[in-house]
Every structure is written in structure tokens, then in C-alpha cells.
Image (cartoon, rainbow, N blue to C red):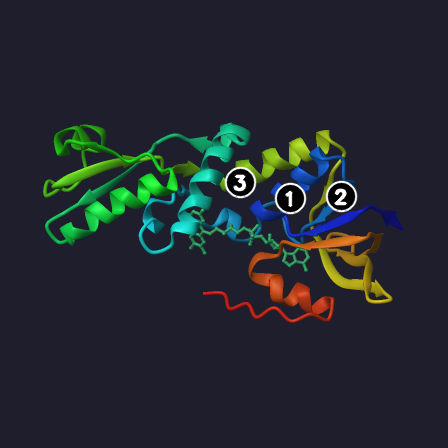
Amino acid sequence: MLETTVVVIGGGATGMGTLRDLSMRGVPAILLEQGGLAHGTSSRFHGLLHSGGRYVVNDPESARECIEENMILRRVGKQCVEVTEGLFVLTPKDDPTFVEPWIKGCAAAGIKAEEISPAEARRLEPDLTPDAQRVFRVPDSCVDGFRLVLHNRMSAERYGGRALTYHEVVAIRQRNGAVCGVTARNLMTGETVDIACRMVVNAAGSWSGEVAALAGLEAAITPD
Ligand SMILES: Cc1cc2nc3c(=O)[nH]c(=O)nc-3n(C[C@H](O)[C@H](O)[C@H](O)COP(=O)(O)OP(=O)(O)OC[C@H]3O[C@@H](n4cnc5c(N)ncnc54)[C@H](O)[C@@H]3O)c2cc1C
């Protein structure tokens, strides 16, 4: 039987980031992933590293979290970020009264939104609509999910963390109402692996409801 402090379930961006963070803090941890690395949403997304610009008016809290995370990722995941930056564009079809609250929202959230001329914007992005009336440059960029997860794994392992792929968690064991271990199935060999632990992190994305159910808990997840 293996033994650790924390078992992280799910080897996507959330789980592998958690494993890296725990490992760098000196907390013994093992991650279990049922497929290969980034088997779930973390390899099937659009690759936009959000600046938070799209949320500043309707969801300022998310906007602040986005820009904070964006700046952290540029630092700790440098090789995974392509610094393309992004453009927010006002066209004749858009509501021009949205611009001022949007600019104020960006300032409040700490998102740098720099107005550039439509001509300059077309120089940067030749396929931009010729109808552009106002253009703002924001720190939206591109993130490579595969690399991010791989690099986080490499970093976590340098600090003693372990990640086991093709290991599906099939049971979360408890004693006196507290987690004491998990059971995983090695999908390559069919073997069963027991890991004693004191804590479990459910980073199973769309599968979180099913993983919570293994601990007798209910999490209403509706993938869409
Ligand atoms: C179409 C689409 C486009 C998106 N575009 C963007 C974007 O441009 N920018 C952005 O920031 N976000 C985007 N997102 C959101 C982003 O992709 C997700 O927030 C992120 O990938 C979630 O990562 P995760 O690690 O939480 O989940 P996942 O990557 O899904 O990881 C969960 C992992 O858990 C594993 N797992 C599940 N059950 C078990 C088990 N029993 N045992 C072991 N392992 C298990 C799965 O195999 C999976 O690998 C997009 C999402 C979608 C759907």
C-alpha cells in the first residue's frame, strides 16, 4: 500500500496545478488520473488566457480573479503562454454606451486596456473588420493546456510529488467520518492500488459529481 498526505484526483490544469503547489510547499501528494495527462477539458479548450476583459461589467469579481491568474501564469508557466495580447473592438453593430462602463470596469479590475487606432489594430491583425470604430488592446493571450499540465508535472516531481496516469479512482475510503485512503484501478494492468492518505482533492472537472459520490457526497454537476 502506498502512503501520502494528499491524493489529488484528476490530472487536468486544476489537479496538476494543485499537485505542483502542494509539492512546492513540502506537502506529500500523489495525483491520480484515469487517462493520459490533460485527458479532459484541459486539452479540449479554446486556449484563451483570459484577461478578464469580458467580465468587467457583469462579473467584476471574476474579472479580478482572471487578471490575477493571468499574471501569475505568465510568471510560473512562461513556456506555456504565447503573449499575443487581445483586442476588444467596437463595431457599428455594438452598443457604444457599453464602452465607458467597460473602460471603468477594466480600471477597477486592474486590467490594462489601451486604446489604439483602428489603423494600428489592422496593422496588428490584418483580418480585423474594416468597420472597427474603436479598438482596445488588453492582456488576453494564448495558453497551451498540454504544456501547462506537463510542465506543472515536471515541476511537482522535482519537489517530490507523484502523478500516476491511467489510474482511475474507484473508491474513497473513510474511517470515523474522515477520509483515510483511496482505491484506484490501473487501467493498463488491471491491478488495484490502495493509497492511504489524510485528504483528497477532487479536481475531476466534469466528473466531480461522480468522484464526490465515491465519498458519499452530492455535487450537482451539469456538463454543458
Ligand atoms: C469548449 C470549451 C472551451 C473552453 N475555452 C476556454 C478558454 O479559452 N480559456 C479558459 O481559460 N478556459 C476555457 N474553458 C474552460 C477550461 O477548459 C476548464 O476550466 C479547465 O480545463 C478545467 O480543468 P480541470 O483540471 O478542472 O478539468 P479537466 O481538464 O476536465 O480535468 C479533470 C480530470 O479528471 C480526470 N478524472 C475524472 N474522474 C476521475 C477518476 N475517477 N479517477 C481519476 N481521474 C479522473 C479526468 O480524466 C480529467 O483529466 C473551456 C471549456 C470548454 C468546455
User: Which residue is under mark 3?
Assistant: 146
SS label for mark 2: strand
Q: Is residue 15 left or right of residue 168?
A: left
Mark 3 → mark 2, Cα distance in angstroms: 21 Å
Q: Are marks 1 and 2 in contact (CB under 8 Å)?
A: yes
User: Which residue is under mark 1?
Assistant: 18
Q: Earlier in the sequence, mark 3 or mark 2?
A: 2
In front: mark 3 or mark 1? 1
Above or below residue 160? Residue 104 is: below
- Estimate the x, y position of residue 59 in percent, counting from the top left: 38, 54
Q: Earlier in the sequence, mark 1 or mark 2?
A: 1
Question: Residue shown at 51%/28% (left/top)?
Answer: 75
Query: In the rendering, which numbered label is found on residue 126?
Result: none
Q: In this rendering, does residue 12 appear at all?
A: no
- Estimate the x, y position of residue 51 in percent, counting from the top left: 38, 41
Question: Residue shown at 73%/31% (left/top)?
Answer: 159
Pick the front one: 170 or 68? 68
SS label for mark 3: helix
Q: Quadrant of residue 218?
A: bottom right
The amino acid pointed to by label 2 is: Ala
Q: Earlier in the sequence, mark 3 or mark 1?
A: 1
- Within 10 Å of disc 3 (Cα), the crowding (few <14, some 14-19, many 20+) is some
Pick the front one: 190 or 82? 82
Q: Is residue 16 left or right of residue 30?
A: left
- Within 10 Å of disc 1 (Cα), the crowding (few <14, some 14-19, many 20+) is many
Question: Residue shown at 73%/52% (left/top)?
Answer: 188
- Estimate the x, y position of residue 204 in percent, counting from the top left: 62, 56
The amino acid pointed to by label 1 is: Thr
